[in-house]
Amino acid sequence: MKAIGIILAGGNNDGRLGALTDHRASAALPVGSCYRAIDFTLSNMSNSGIGKVAVLTQYNSRSLRDHLTSSKWWDFGRKQGGLFVFTPYTSNTGNDWFRGTADSIYQNMTYLLRSNEEYVIITSGDSIYKMDYRDVLQYHIDKGADVTVVYQNMEGKDLSLFGIMQMDENKRLLGFEEKPEQAQTNSASLGIYIISRKLLISLLQEVVPQGGYGLVKDIIIPYKEKLNIYGYEYQGYWNTIATGISGYFTTNMDFLKKEVRDIFVNQYPYIETKPKDEPPAKYNYGAEVTDSIVGSGTIFNGKVEHCVVFRKVYVDEGASVRNSILMEGTRIGKNCVIENAILDKEVEISDGQTVIGKSMEEPIILKKGTKL
Amino acid sequence: MRKKEMIAMLLAGGQGSRLGILTRKVAKPAVTYGGRFRIIDFPLSNCINSGVDTVGVLTQYQPLRLNQHIGIGIPWDLDKKNGGVTILAPHVKGGDSGEWFMGTANAIYQNIDFIDSNNPEYVLILSGDHIYKMDYSQMLRFHKEKGAAATIAVLEVPMEEASRFGIMNTEADDKIYEFEEKPENPKSNLASMGIYIFTWSRLREALIEDNAIHADSDFGKHIIPKMLEEGQVLYAYRFRGYWKDVGTIESYWESNMELIKALPDFNLYEDFWKIYTNSDHQPPQYTAPGAVVKESLVSDGAEIYGEVRHSILGPEVVVKAGAVVKDSIIMGGTVIGEGTVIDRCILDENCQIGSGVQMGVGENIPNETKPNIYNTGITVVGANTNVPDNVVIGKNCVLYGETTAQDYPDGTIQSGKSVIREGIK
């Protein structure tokens, strides 16, 4: 592959995910019973034949780094290339936090300088999709583009959460508005960019020392006339957990749809994650589990309906759980009633408790390790 | 030179012929167990959990699936720069022709070079046939404390069953004075588990000497009696825990079903002493609206639209709407068609069962061709088998290969009949 990858996994999305990102970067958020958000992008990179990937992280990166301790699950345990995890560091030339997306790459310029690949694919770490970046790269080359921005037609969705692009009939970028109140088009950027490595180096050297720290704000938008920036329309499934609690909830619940599971679960190439080798899920006599996805090592004695259940969850007798997300290691006591809730990892609910959120759009969140 | 205190040699070449069609294309250690594991995962995981990081796996019978499963040992953290897992297959040596492994000890004899290259003090001999969790480092400590030449792990079995096992007759401190293979009148109930620790220098000597006499040199038959005769110090190491030889269709089925109990004797759910396995990927499983799943183990990626009771499902099994699976073991990748009823059957990996099939019905008549293997009512379907729609299949039947409607006279296979369609398409 003629490209290297950069995954921007620095943020917690300005706290839009509330308590869920108190202790972790959004890219480390658990998704779909057994994955973490970054697995999707990492697997896409690996499945697209990219052999060298940098993950730029800053915000509370412990769980993310834990997840990435060994890169072999994504086939990045290589002698050549492989997975690089970069965090801000101090040195005699400065000790800055990453001040923005462009700055985070600029501060790790050595990664770009020491690579020989012609192109760079820049993505976020908290989107859920399956994409072969080779198709985008081919488009980029065919168009003779300087920068290619992947977008999707998001008619009917809340466009104020996205960067909205205006393009001419050749898909050349004319305008780009970040999170507009009144969107001009339905074309929303997916935060996936392809650019030549040398051009990226020179652009970063131009803008970052002048205080331009954002990729979109300081490169894409100001350079849209000077550079040939093209849009690439992606029509497959794409969702993000970055937009907030509701986005996180619906992205997880999407896995209950067969067409979504077909993409991520049943069709090759697979989405890889760090294996945990839990035994099969166990359905005991009192189990009534319907319309749910389940991770391994989980034990059911009670009723679970329309839920996303992660690994090693325990649901005791007489309990009833509906429309909820139960993360790894949660325990639900006897005769509990749980509805419209997100239970973060290792939450323990003692017998007979009731936890009911307002709705699936506004679920109640119990923080990691909460004991009720 | 490399120096290892103890390395393991895992005998994984056996067919396990009493498992019938389940070992048609795979060696017994590669047969799946408990949904998502394979039998060999247990000794391999025991090794790494015990701190044994160098394992030679001896293969012979149908090694392909085993080789793919083990790979370079990543799932068990046995992908080591210094040590790790090595597959040892029979091979052509200098001179004219190669040799098969002719016996358990002969297999080790033929790999003396491998053991020497690791320069170990002790060698642990394991078989890939048993389900158990064991800390071999404790057994090694015992071996060293006793200053033994060989230590043999033993299980206390009920006295009335002792005549089915290799029995160690011991003195008060468990020093072995006699070994009896399946004695008619057992003097002790200490049954050999086929797990040995040898001081390598002693074993090396014995292997070379015995090989000159017996071409089929075997640990139980030759090496142990020989060492006892020579007056070497052999000790029995008592193992107290769950240990199962899943050697027959019935014991395989029973042992799997024991895992379903609310509190099974053998606990796979504790974080301590984990069992590792290799899987392509570990996606979520799905139970549809209207699905019923009770008293069952269900593995990653399975999709259940029908009813599953008292059964074990492997990875990515699909149970379609209206189908009923009960008292059965369905291995990975198998698809059960709509409205099909599977009762007390074992379905191997990647089978396609049509819709409206009834399997496991009728009288318990032992299998006509292999009554000693299939006689407890369990119908067994070999890997990659296709079964057409709307057929009825009895008990103790064996199905294998691409079967078509013509194979089912009047749409029925009576109890005890077999349909085997060999060949590569």
Image: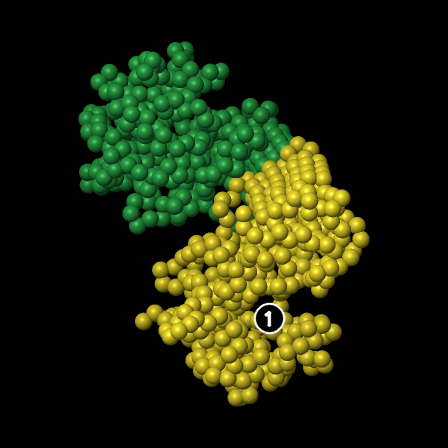
* Spot occupied by residue A219 in the image (x, y as percentages of width and height): 26, 23
Q: Is residue A220 visible?
A: no
Residue A359 lies in what quarter of the image? top right
The colour assigned to chain B within the rendered structure? yellow
Q: Residue type at mark 1? A: Met
What residue is shown with label 1?
B193
Q: Residue at x 74, y 56 (%)?
A: B416
Q: Who is closer to the viewer here, A159 or A332?
A: A159
Please state the horizontal and vertical placement of residue B291, each as a whole percent of the image. Answer: 68, 36
Q: Kindly indicate the quadrant of the structure image that contains residue A182.
A: top left
Is any part of residue A55 visible from this angle?
Answer: yes
**B395 lies left or right of B169:** right
Badge 1 element: strand
Which residue is farthest bottom? B230
Q: Quadrant of residue A224?
A: top left
Callout 1: 10 Å neighbours few (<14), some, many (20+)? many
For the point 69% across and 54% down, the residue is B418
Residue A341 % position (x, y): 58, 31
